[in-house]
Amino acid sequence: MTDSQEKRPLGAAGWIATLAGSGRMGQAPGTIGSAEACIIAYFLPAQVMPWAILAAILVGTWASGAHARALGQSDPGEVIVDELAGQWIALAGHMVSRASAGWLIPCLALFRLFDILKPWPVNKLEKLPGGVGIMADDLLAGVEANLCLVAFRYFFQGQSGTGLLTWFL
């Protein structure tokens, strides 16, 4: 990031896209955004999480696209609202109470793994234009991380009905 970008004031879209400017702080902005998502999720009631995810997707798609256009970049590193939404998808159904906070670290690690490595088809989605492309790869990385944890919990702990599946079954 150049000094001019760092000093550029954030408009509403930039403020949302960078999670109040934290995407501009130092190294590993994606990991910072994912960690922030975990902290926020810890305090959100489980019943609110589906609506929070939906809001993050809708508002994040607009904000990330608008901020990227303002910077003249296709996917600026400082945009981390996509990590927020993707991390929340990874956590969906695993964080049903503060007692299940032990799933925060495995969800964070799996989401970051899928987000960084971008296995197929995640790597195809990042090529979509604008805010859709910025958000879509992280959303799918979140789904992949979530389903990996569902499989782990099912096969190694005998727990079914966890993760995103709880919302659809």
Image (cartoon, rainbow, N blue to C red):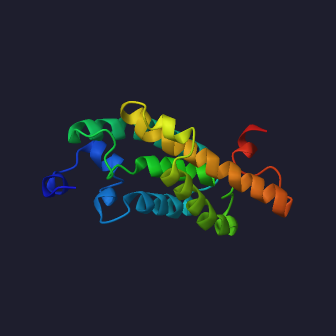
In the figure, is residue 137 to the left or right of 25? Answer: right
Residue in view at x 48 percent, y 54 percent: 116
Residue in view at x 79 percent, y 39 percent: 169
Pick the quarter of the image with the N terminus: bottom left
**Residue 107, relative to residue 49: is it above or below?**
below
Q: Residue furthest left?
A: 4
In the figure, is residue 109 to the left or right of 156? Answer: left
Residue in view at x 78 percent, y 59 percent: 153
For this rendering, which residue is in front, 36 or 79? Answer: 79
Query: Could you tell me if residue 37 is visible in this image?
Result: yes
x and y, in percent, of residue 108 in the image: 56, 61
x and y, in percent, of residue 142 in the image: 58, 48
Q: Residue furthest right?
A: 158
In the figure, is residue 16 to the left or right of 11? Answer: right
For this rendering, which residue is in front, 128 or 157? Answer: 128
For this rendering, which residue is in front, 95 or 112? Answer: 112
x and y, in percent, of residue 59 in the image: 41, 38
In the figure, is residue 9 to the left or right of 91? Answer: left
**Residue 116, relative to residue 121: is it above or below?**
below
Residue in view at x 50 percent, y 45 percent: 138
Query: Could you tell me if residue 55 is visible in this image?
Result: no
Image quadrant of residue 121?
A: top right
